[in-house]
Image (spheres, rainbow, N blue to C red):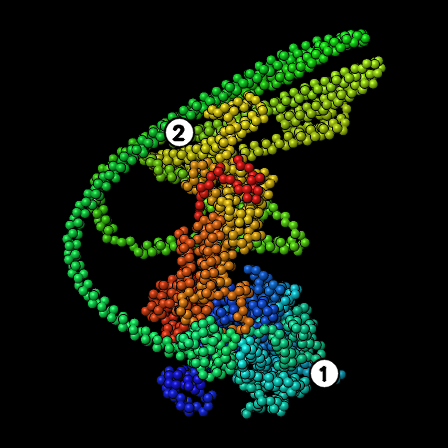
Amino acid sequence: MSTKELYTKGARVWIKDPQTVWKPASVTTDFDGKSLPVEDEAGNAHTISIKEDADLPPLRNPEILIGENDLTSLSYLHEPAVLHNLEVRFVDRNEIYTYCGIVLVAINPYYNLQIYNNDTIMAYRGQNMGDLDPHIYAVSEEAFKLMERDGVNQSIIVSGESGAGKTVSAKYSMRYFASVGGTGETETQVERRVMASSPIMEAIGNAKTTRNDNSSRFGKYIEIDFSKSFHIIGASMRTYLLEKSRVVFQANDERNYHIFYQMCAAREEKELLGLSLRESDDFIYTNQGNNPNIDNVDDVKEFKAFKEALKLLGFNDGDIGSIYKIMAAILHLGNVKISPGSGRGDSETSTVRDEDASLPVVASLLEVDEKLLRQWLCNKKVVARNDSYVTPLKAAEASQARDALAKCIYSNLFDWIVFQINKALKTSHKVNKFIGVLDIYGFETFEINSFEQFCINYANEKLQQQFNQHVFKLEQEEYIKEGIEWKMIDFYDNQPCIDLIESKLGVLALLDEECRVPKGSDKSWVDKLYDKCKKWEHFSKPRLSQTAFLVRHFADQVEYECDGFLHKNRDTVMEEQVVILKASKNKLVSDLFISEGPDTLGAPPARGGKLPPPSAAGNKKAHKKTVGSQFRDSLNLLMDNLNSTNPHYVRCIKPNDAKQAFMFDNTRAVQQLRACGVLETVRISAAGYPSRWTYHDFYVRYRVLCHSKDVKQGDYRKTCENIVARLIPDPDKYQFGKNKLFFRAGQVAYMEKLRSDKLKACGIMIQKNVKMWLYRKKYLRIQAATGTIQRWVRGHTARRKVTDIRRNRAAVKMQAVVRGWLQLKRYQKMRKLAIGLQAQIRAWRARREYGEMRRNKAALTIQTRVRGWLQRKRYQKSLRMIVMAQSAVRRHFAKKELKKLKIEAKSVNHQRELNKGLENKIISLQQRLTEAKEESKSLRSKVEKGAELSGELVKFKKTEEESKIKGNKIKELEEELRSVKAELAHETDEKVDLVTEKVRSEEEWANAQVVHKEEIGKLKEELENSKKLVESSSQIDPEQVSRLESEKTAIHQEYEQERIAYQKLLKDFNRLEMANENLQDEVNILRGGNMHNRTISNVSMTSSIMGEEDMSLRVGEEESAYGSVSGRSSLVSTLDRRDRDRQLESLTVLPENGQQDVGLMMKLQGALKEAHREKEALERKLEDIENSVAGAERQSAEILKLQELEIENGKLREDMGRLRLSVANQGTGEAGENEAAREMADQFEAMQEELDRRRAECLQLKTVLANVQLSGTVESGEPSSLMSEAGSGHGSAPEAEELLLAYETQKNVIQQLQASLNQERERAVTVEKELRAEVEKVGNLNRDQQAVIQTNMNKAPSNQTEAYMQHELTRLTGENFDLREKIENLNDSVKRLKRQLKTYMKKLQESGVGNIGDMDERDPDSTESDQTLPVILKKEAEYLGMLEYSKDQEEKLLKSIITDLKPRVASQMLPGMPAYIVFMLIRHLDHINDDKNVRSLIQGGISHIKKTIKKRGQTDIELKTLWLSNTLRLLHCLKQYSGEPQFQAESSAKQIEHCLRNFDLSAYRRVLSDIAVWIYQGITKVMEEEVQPGLVVALLEHEGIGGLSGDKPRPMRGRAGSTGNDLDTPTHLDPKEALDGLLTQLTRFHLVLQKHGLDPEIISQIFRQIFYYLCAGSLNNLLLRKDMCHWSRGMQIRYNIAQLEQWARDQNLEDTGSKVIDTLLPIIQATQLLQARKSEEDVPGICDMCDKLRVSQIIKILNLYTPADEFEERVSPAFVRKIQNKLQERAMEEAKNQVTLLMDTKFSFAVRFPFNPSNINFAELEIPQMYNNLPQLVRKV
């Protein structure tokens, strides 16, 4: 249909208005072709004359399209539609960003919005442009993503007029790049330096203007460099056209550059003390604006930020000080007053008076000659050919020259600072790609426009040309891509205007030519313009001015005044003044004017191979470029750079000149929209096909308009062609592309009208029938209800009367029963109390008597056993002595027999020599000799044994005497002990008497109380009755209850926050630890080493393990994620004793009166303590003596064995001698034949004798050295020297071997001495500890007694005695508890020693040792025989439940248990098997009391777990789950078997027997808990990363309810490259399958967690965290998507969330009480808010319903809410304001807590690990063979 046909009655249009530019109106009569009558909203009628189609007023868009986030998605694209859409979004919805195709329109809100935090950055990361709400981060993400994906350099062009927010937009864009382009989660030095450049540039380049408090007075282009991994590695900055005139002049209500005011405000800083700074009002250069302050800006704070930024960017202290001096010098230079001198007219002079105080300060700060500076401020040098002369300057000329000098100094300093910043940001690495951010001034037009405005508008002409070409190119590319027919779009080309400015005879060329003319002036230049430029269409001459010219720019026609053009273009400074500054002693001042060129200091190297413009600061004046030429060259270079990149555009709009928050001035906005090219973009879009739909979306939206015959199943394009061809007859109004359907402007609005009419007709039909049915049902229901009500009222009246009668009768009866019951209860209570008191007293006395009888019986038993043991020992010693005496006697007789046999042997030899020929006789004699020798040998051994036994007998006699002496001493001590016990018994009897008296007095007091109570009983009864009546009628104070509940909630929340903070710190610690390890690996790689020298002793985990002292002192930690409950404390602290004292005080009843002898009791107490101490000391001495006697007995046994071996060796040597002699004497020949053999035998005997002699000498030397050791140790304590003893033993020096042997012996002696010294030290340390403990105990007792004395100083004597008795009872009870604990420890030690003794006995019997005297002492209670002992030990070993391993294979063992274990293998074993094995190893080490290896094993296990997860489990959820389960199982085992009562409630008797005995491993429970938290966080992180790609599609875009799709038209106008898939998700998810895929993922996670035996509570906590992440991610996305905020989409989302809730219920996640589903409440309430009715009556209900949503989120959703159809009601601004007022208190609280709009996706709940004991019996546990051959490395014990 044609456009004219739309102008019918009721059509909505826009008409022009002089105040608001455009105002809405409605057509009152159909258009007749000539005129169009309309009526505005105020009721005023207007008639519009229509001569051609262009005169028709613009049509208004449908309400459904109002507020769109993309202007090009509007059906009608024109100026009023754009303006109105921006106003609605900005004013009504507080949305400051809006897309206009590829342009982002940003409106300055003049308000601090919380939309720029890190959560918002993460929300836009990876999203396509157009998917979320418009934002500067969306444009930044688009640029970053295209750079990553396409490898093309990008640029972001931010433009707008002053005060529009350009600088802030550029700053947030760079912040985004610094966040997503960083090298990790933390900001590196490079990103910090890039961001630190902002405060510096704002201080020296920004100023306050009438339009903006922080206006950038220069243009800048920042290039951020990226590496191949797209991390920021550097940056560079180029600046353009600094406004130097602001240094010396400011208009009213404006300021100079911020740095001057910051320095004046911070003049008290030490860096500024010597600069003579004062208030800013005291300086001419800073007081001209008369308004030096800016609201909400602290100049001192800003100066500190400026100073810190300089240091961060590498400025040294000298340069920083020089910068301050130059800035201060500029301020003082402005205060130099130049006064007129003598003369008039052309001969006028000027001077600076001597009393001027500012000039010396300037000279001092700049370090120049004051005299020369004074001279050349008022004079100039004129050069005429070969001569030069000095001429004075007029006062005005001198002031102008002074100001020019100040501007030049500031400009050069500005360029130098930019150059230094570029040096700091420059990178030495190769730059892969870059993103440029251009922050440049927008189009400007004022009442008086000068050279600066001309340059600014020239730059905007160039940028607008580039913008138009880019937009046109993108538009045509889209048409070509879709393959549709298109015509060339006509767009405004501003090349003629650019040619006017920069051509050969253009404005800039003529200006430069006039600057080179000696007598050139502004007037002559303007005349040349009138003559040369009149041929240009865009140039014209004003009618009423001869000093101005007009240029028609793309935005508007601007009139420029020529005054000052030549001076500003030349920008000259007197050469003499520059020479003075070059000679400055300040290096920086000199460098500013000697360097190659300050104009190029701020420019980085040009990209693309082009050279930067040549230097403009040559030594000769003729070679210096003008400002216009420099600006043109730098602008051309900028355009070349931008053309080589892919540009992105941000257009900043200033909404009003009053700087009011969210106030929109239509006139100012239209001016800027025209100037910044937004309307040109709209015009280009409207000239083509602005509305674009995919075939599927078009069919879903407009299928109500088609007939069934038009639908082609499976072919959306054909169906759409049928629909469009029937609805729109003109084929030029639409085009069919490959993937999209294109429409001309207005066609979508027409189809929306048809759709609305069709739906309205259908709705009326449905409503008619439904209303009829409803009213009929209502009538029938009322008729039936009337009869029912009458019947029920009558019955109710009768029942109420009967009820009253029954109630009165029941009340009388109840009163009687209750009163009787109360009296009965009172009597029973009194009787129960009396009986209870008697029972307690009698029980106490019975227990005391029973305890005394037990002690007596125990003492008798001990005495019996000890006396029996002593008698047995005495009998055994006597028996051994008798045997030794018999041996000595027998040895004596054997020696005599030996001598006789030797004599007989000699006589036989003599006879043999005399009778050599008698062989038979010799043989017989030989036989007899052999027999004699054998007899001699046996006798000799007996004799030697006898001699040894005699020596031992002497030693044993001495030992016996010493034992007798010690025994006597022990008897004396026992006698003393008996006496002390008797005294103790006497004292106890006295105390019993005291307690008896106390009980008697208490009974008397009780009787008196009974009498007293009977007297006041009646009064109390009445009082109680009244109280009961009051209590029954009153209720609990709700305010007090609510206060208590709030306090409870606050305490709980504080506790949760502390736990969360701790786990965050733990998470940060683990992250920093991993980063540290990564850095260490990188350092090792850089150093060239790949070795890993980490051991168990230096792993990172050891830093978190506390020392032994901390372990022993940790008491009673609460079970939480902070750690686990500490076990038994190894110290019985004073606090524990005081706790027991307090408990006893509450349970003990003491008499109130009675006299006691306190002094006597204190004496008895002291004597008893002294006796106990002496007894303990004697017991320790006795134990030491027994140990020394046992050692002496072992030493004597070893000596006997050595002597026996020596005797046997002697016998063997004699046998060898006889054998050799017999061989030598044998033979059949003559005697000479055996001569050689005899000679050999003689020589051998001689050698043997010599060897024996040597051995004897060695033995003697050893004996001497041993004696030296004994004498030195016992007597003098100093060992004697080796040489002295050797000299005393032998007259001659020993040989080499003997010296070596002596040296070795001396070493052994020294080692023995060292060992004895160590023993003495240990003994001294032990004594010291005992004494310190005793002193501490005495001190504690003294303090307690002093406290008692001080407390009872003012009490009566009876009260003092009572307090003292109470104190004594509590103290004795505490000591009794201590003694019981000692007894338990001793019993445990005895049991352990008995088990070890049995093991040793078994080994001795297996080795074949028979009955040994010392080993015959067995356990009296044991009745088993020796033959059955091994069987019993074997049976007991089967149930110990321990594993033993070789200590040198600990690393290999841990590798097999942890590192080499695969999850697949672990799933086939018992869940928690690795933890059980490690704990069984720990139990064995505890059993053998191996402290060192216990620590090594646990630390090694922790280290291996961390290494395994870091190496193989970063993304393996199954591996992490395996070790989380086993870490928690080991933690539970350490608790369950710690022996603490709170962990043994569910343990069996066998498990209690398996508790640890020697070690308190409570400290390691904290470490294991931290490791478990780290693994838990890793699991949740992996799960979050896996569900993140499909989160939004599954929960927001999935349409589970068929036929409910009510999405409104979407623009489909994203950038061509922005609609690609996300970088992290290469495949696009189908919304139809996304929800099922998400549920499948969650099911897989749940199966993995269950497979490895993870506790259900932990599984619920994991899914609670994942559900929170799902909720946060979906809600954040919803808050940034306008297309999702309508009723039908809210129902779809609610259905999707319900599927998630049902899944959680099916998995029984709610059974553990972790409230998993409650984490989804924010997104659930958001969907309920979308579906709720939004009328004024619903305000309270909505506020109560959305208690889990933040106020900002509620307002955001309401502002985003857009009906999908016209039948839905829109949310009015008044409704939103009422919601805000209702939630004002909540909003203030959230503002105080700095609550942000988006949910924190990185928030983690505090994890709890509830105690879960195991029922596994370790004795029955078997290690499977599949477990990495582990059974070969361990042995069951």
Q: Nearer the viewer, residue 1163 or 1199?
A: 1199
- Estimate the x, y position of residue 207 in percent, counting from the top left: 54, 74
Residue at 48% across / 73% down in the picture? 694
Residue at 29% across / 73% down in the picture? 769
> Compared with residue 1790, is residue 1457 higher up or lower down, i.e. above or below?
above
Q: Is residue 416 left or right of residue 1005?
A: right
Looking at the rendered structure, the secondary structure element under dot 1 is: strand
User: Disc 1 or 2, which lies upstream in sequence?
Assistant: 1
- Estimate the x, y position of residue 1057 in percent, counting from the top left: 45, 55
What residue does disc 2 label?
1160
Could you tell me if the residues under marks 1 and 2 are in contact, i.e. CB atoms within 8 Å?
no
- Estimate the x, y position of residue 1627 in percent, counting from the top left: 53, 64
What residue does disc 1 label?
383
Q: Is residue 1128 left or right of residue 825?
A: right
Amino acid type, residue under disc 1 in the picture: Val
Q: Nearer the viewer, residue 1724 or 424?
A: 1724
